[in-house]
Image (cartoon, helix red, strand yellow):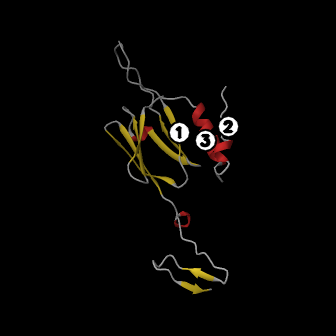
């Protein structure tokens, strides 16, 4: 078993301790699977997950977000066998559950099913308190440089 040491990367990062466990889990998860899906970036803060769920109706699918994990599940009701014999059965008729780890402040906006594809729209919405802001720097005499007004002015504090 291979162990990855992230300590050199995290020496100058603060608050990223959960990232190491997420990377470790992603490294050990099995690739591929059913159903196939795409993840698209549709803008600076917009994303879309598209899953191929042919044969499933809206009632057969479920979406749930809990603790930043989006879970997409599908279960088709048991159907009585139709008369006849299958020579080849290539259309999957099985239940599934797929989980996606969402970053902080990413929320699900919409989900729609069209032409056998489930489209899940996501957006990262950073709160105002988390956005960058200018900090005034005081001089030794309590003066403050006003950088927000576009001109270099000094005011006494």
According to the picture, the residue beneath numbered tag 2 turns out to be: 5
Question: Element under label 2?
Answer: loop
The answer to which of 104 and 93 lies nearer the viewer is: 104
Ranked by sequence position, the earlier of labels 2 and 3 is 2
The answer to which of 29 and 50 lies nearer the viewer is: 29
Give coordinates of residue 135: x percent, y percent.
58, 72
According to the picture, the residue beneath numbered tag 1 turns out to be: 99
Q: Quadrant of the C terminus?
A: bottom right
On the picture, is 62 further left or further right than 137?
A: left
Which mark is on residue 26? none
Which mark is on residue 22? 3
Whether residue 133 is situated above or below residue 6 in the rendered picture: below
**How many numbered tags mark residues here?**
3
Ranked by sequence position, the earlier of labels 1 and 3 is 3
Q: Residue at x 51, y 29 (%)?
A: 31
How busy is the neighbourhood of tag 3: few (under 14 within 10 Å), some, or many (20 plus)?
A: few
Residue 114: quarter of image? top left
Give coordinates of residue 117: x percent, y percent.
36, 38
Contact flag, marks 1 and 2 (Cβ < 8 Å)? no
How far apart, in angstroms, are the residues tagged by discs 1 and 3? Answer: 13 Å
Give coordinates of residue 155: x percent, y percent.
57, 86
Q: Residue at x 54, y 49 (%)?
A: 103
The answer to which of 90 and 17 lies nearer the viewer is: 17
The answer to which of 2 and 96 lies nearer the viewer is: 2
């Amino acid at each position: 078993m291979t162990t990855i040491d992230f300590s050199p990367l995290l020496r100058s990062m603060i608050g990223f301790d959960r990232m190491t466990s997420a990377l470790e889990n992603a490294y050990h998860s099995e690739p591929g699977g059913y159903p196939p899906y795409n993840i698209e970036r549709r803008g600076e803060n917009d994303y879309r997950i598209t899953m191929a769920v042919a044969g499933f109706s809206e009632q057969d699918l479920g979406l749930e977000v809990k603790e930043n994990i989006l879970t997409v599940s599908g279960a088709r009701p048991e159907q009585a066998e139709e008369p006849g014999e299958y020579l080849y059965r290539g259309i999957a008729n099985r239940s599934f559950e797929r989980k996606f780890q969402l970053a902080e402040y990413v929320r699900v906006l919409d989900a729609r099913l069209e032409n056998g594809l489930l489209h899940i729209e996501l957006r990262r919405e950073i709160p105002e308190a988390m956005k960058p802001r200018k900090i005034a720097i005081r001089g030794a005499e309590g003066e403050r440089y006003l950088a927000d007004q576009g001109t270099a002015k000094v005011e006494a504090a």
